[in-house]
Image: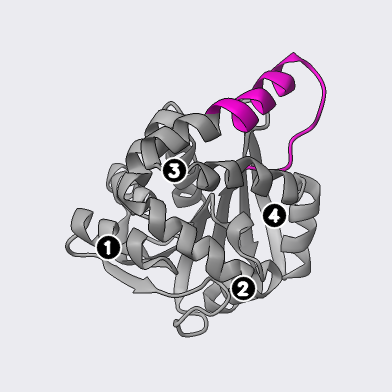
Amino acid sequence: MQKQDKIIEMFNEIAPSYDKANRILSFGVDISWRKFACKKVLKYYKPDFINIVDVACGTGDMIAIWQEKAKMLSKNIASIKGIDPSEGMLEIAKQKFLNIDFIQAKAQNLPLESQSVDIVSISYGIRNVVERKQALNEFFRVLKKGGIFVVLEFTKREKGGFIATLRDFYLKNILPTLGGIISKNKSAYEYLPNSIDEFLSKEEFIKELSDSGFEMIDFKSFSFGVSSMFIAKKL
């Protein structure tokens, strides 16, 4: 089995307990990061009728927040789609959102027309895409000119210092144990800190975005560098 397929199968296995584990392990703080990002993007994107695609949508966390923030800012979502390669995750998402179009597909091969989307988001999913540069090219392809791409991700962490040491101890020791208890799949939650270590630094990822044709318009680091937000535009 290829690496990408193994990752997808892992998410299939933890799908039933994913929402519960996510809220407990992140102390719910990831919701505030998602809300911040959605609000920022909707303020940057001026048109009122918006087509949104959330890639690696999982069980639909970002779908709910896009809807909430659009309503708050009096923006009209013309359409919103969730795309994920995990059948297990999408089954949960479809139960939570009865009127949303969910599509099973990989990020590097989106079944969407070129220049058909205003906003593409991917939250804590880009590091799980093995063919990342191909996926970035796909996001660029499906976005309209002037469209916005937003990424939330756990970027490679700087070493040293009390906060960094505490953070690393939690990710390496406590999170896999708690995640294993909740999901009955400890290896899946051992994968998380390892996948962050194997991912890029924020500078490296910004360069990849630029190489794919995007122009960076905003960046923010949350919680002492645990999470990063990247907002880029298709020129």
Mark 3–mark 1 distance (CA, rounded to whole Å): 27 Å
- Model colouring: one colour
Q: Residue at x 56, y 60 (%)?
A: 149
**Image quarter of residue 87:** bottom left
Q: Which residues are magenta?
A: 154-174
Q: Residues within 10 Å of mark 3 (few under 14, many from 20)?
A: some
- Amino acid type of disc 3? Lys
Of the 4 image quadrants, the one containing the C terminus is bottom right
Mark 4–mark 1 distance (CA, rounded to whole Å): 34 Å
Which dot marks residue 91?
Answer: 1
Mark 4–mark 2 distance (CA, rounded to whole Å): 32 Å
Q: Secondary structure at mark 4?
A: strand
- From the viewer's perspective, tell me whether residue 116 is left or right of residue 234: left
Which dot marks residue 39?
Answer: 3
- Amino acid type of disc 2? Gln
Q: Nearer the viewer, mark 3 or mark 1?
A: 1
Mark 3–mark 4 distance (CA, rounded to whole Å): 17 Å
